[in-house]
Amino acid sequence: MHFTSEQRLDGDVLERAFTLGEIPGILWTPASAAAPTPLILLGQPGGLGLRGMYPRLAARARSAAADGFAAVAIELPGDGDRPRWAAAEQARADLRQTLQAAGPVPDEIVDRLILPLVDRAVPEWQATLDAVLALPEIGGPVGYSGGVISIGIRLAVVDPRITAAVLFAGSFIPRAMFAEARKVSIPLHVLLQWDDEGNDRQAALELFDAFGSADKTLTANLGGHTGVPQSAHEAAAAFLARYLNQR
């Protein structure tokens, strides 16, 4: 891990940009928390990149820091300044065309868009977790928060260091991920926007039902994809605080 820049946010959050091999990322640590601090992995939707998502990611990192947690985000494969990924761009274009035609989205397009992304992104998240947890100021437990929901599912299944997760039900879900969801056993808090224009509500409800976790909560709110109310963010933060403060 190579830190490339740093700055203070509001005086009490240290923000450091880094690269890990070819993977760009940002690490936020609270200045006042006692080390080593718990860590939250901040997931994000594909296609926007760290720059496009920065205001929302920084706001979530500030909230995490206020609870005494570090947070980290990485650029997804094919996004931002990373090498172009032709297959993913074609799948995204096919998805847009289908949505513009107001037709049902075929499973084949969802599989081409999401499954290769999960296969690439999850090992990169695990490598990032290795590097961040090697820093003296970062400890555990570790939580995951955000999208793409299929990335969060795979991480919850394969990485035992993640002890709780907040999942955003706002991305298309390959049918294969339902089998993986049944293997998830960590505590879950799922956020669902009831009127999300880009989300299959019924599929999100079926996915929640499939999760194998004994401790799982679904919070549904009226509104579109970007209309998550502050109360829902606060409930998700309280959920993570409950589990990440257990040492």
Image: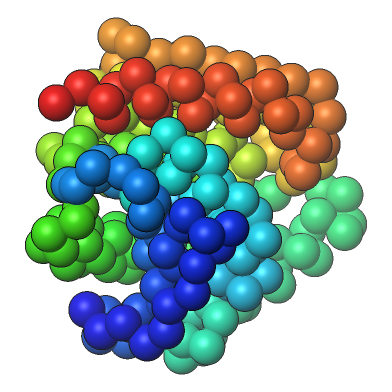
State the residue in front, 74 or 46: 74
Decide if residue 179 is on the left or right side of residue 199: left
Decide if residue 176 is on the left or right side of residue 111: left
Q: Is residue 209 shown above or below 114?
A: above
Q: Is residue 245 shown above or below 55?
A: above
Looking at the picture, the colour scheme in use is rainbow
Count of picture labels: 0
Q: Taking the image as drawn, is residue 110 in sight?
A: no
Residue at 74% from the left image edge and 20% from the top image edge:
221
Give the x, y percent position of residue 170. Answer: 63, 41
Residue at 20% from the left image edge and 36% from the top image edge:
141
Question: The N terminus appears in which quarter of the rendering?
Answer: bottom left
Residue at 81% from the left image edge and 22% from the top image edge:
222
Give the x, y percent position of residue 227. Answer: 80, 37
Give the x, y percent position of residue 217. Answer: 47, 13
Q: Taking the image as drawn, is residue 247 in sight?
A: yes
Give the x, y percent position of residue 191. Answer: 59, 27
State the residue in front, 98 or 230: 230
State the residue in front, 239 or 116: 239
State the residue in front, 103 or 114: 114
